[in-house]
Image (spheres, rainbow, N blue to C red):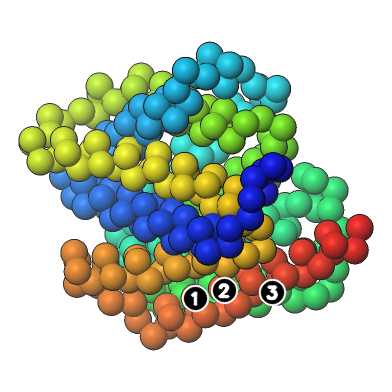
Amino acid sequence: MATGMKENRAAGIIWMLATMFCFITLDAIMKHLMESYSLVQVTWARFFFATIIAALACGRDIGRLAKTRHPKPQLLRSVLLMSTTAMFNAGIRTTPLATGTTIMFLSPILVTILAIPLLGEKVGLRRWAGVVLGFTGALIVVRPWEEGLGAYGHGVLFLLAAAFLNANYQILTRKVRGDDPRTSLLYTAAAGAVVTSLIVPWFWSWPTGFDWLLLIASGLAGGLGHLFLIRSFQAAPASVVAPFSYSSLLWAALFGFVIWGDWPELWTWAGAAIIIGSGLYIFHRERLAHEDR
């Protein structure tokens, strides 16, 4: 939590709930738009309009905030977030939104594994047990023993790749904590906007008036989601607000049912419960490990 700010746990929780609503709104809009537009065009809109939100958040300090102490990690973070978004979008094209959200819950579990070679952290037997439990939950959701590539086909492969890329993105986020959070927000949005703007002309299909609003809304939801996330961690400790990130499954299930008539199967709920439980346990063990240092 930022120093010099008064702790407000209730506000932190509300900001986290708002964050998850924004992110699932973004995911639902992108899934809907990909029924008519290319993956590249939808991803471009998410970053292009989020850059505007990031610039507005920086305000008059944008010149100062555009300077980073960690240029290489920041650029690599941007590439990883852009790649995560592209893989996730490709995955939810053919996979229910709630299922895609559940698979992404693997990211914090993967962070535990990647922190060993990338951050030099030690992981005890109890956290390894949590990791194994989390992957068991993922197997229940994906059900690879079913015909073909499992219950949801090749879309799951894109989602697993997205979870892996997102875990690396989170690892690098730890390495740029010396920068202002708005600097990180600006870099991730602007880099994605620049790259996708270079290639989107080859995938462009002119949107209708309403679809323009949806494209703008995707960037707005993404940008606001990251801003709300910053506010959440400024208002309350991570140990208080982080568990509420799992509320995204409820939003995803609701959006999926209302828009596409997809209600998560019992397998999905069961796997999600196991993954969430393992994620919370790993987070608890990590907190205890840091307190003992």
Q: Is residue 104 left or right of residue 5?
A: left
Whole-Å distance between the Cαs marked 1 and 2? Answer: 5 Å
Image point (29%, 26%), residue name = 200
Mark 3 element type: helix
Image point (44%, 30%), residue name = 57
Residue at the top extreme of this rendering: 63
For the residues bearing labels 1 and 2, Cβ distance under 8 angstroms: yes
Q: Residues within 10 Å of mark 3 (few under 14, many from 20)?
A: some
- What is the three-letter code of the residue carrying label 1? Ala
Q: Is residue 286 left or right of residue 210?
A: right
Whole-Å distance between the Cαs marked 3 and 1? Answer: 14 Å
Is residue 147 or residue 5 the one in the foreground? 5
For the residues bearing labels 3 and 1, Cβ distance under 8 angstroms: no
- What is the three-letter code of the residue carrying label 3? Tyr
Mark 1 element type: helix
Instruction: Write down the residue under mark 2.
Output: 275
Is residue 192 or residue 227 the one in the foreground? 227
Residue 136 spot, x, y in % from top left: 60, 77
Residue 15 spot, x, y in % from top left: 47, 55
Is residue 150 or residue 104 the one in the foreground? 104
Q: Quadrant of residue 239?
A: bottom right
- Figure check: 200 above or below 218: above
Q: Count up the numbered dots.
A: 3
Instruction: Write down the residue under mark 1.
Output: 272
Mark 2 element type: helix
Image point (54%, 32%), residue name = 182
Instruction: Write down the residue under mark 3.
Output: 281
Label 3 or label 1, whichever lies nearer to me, is 3
Q: Quadrant of residue 148?
A: bottom left
Residue 220 spot, x, y in % from top left: 32, 39
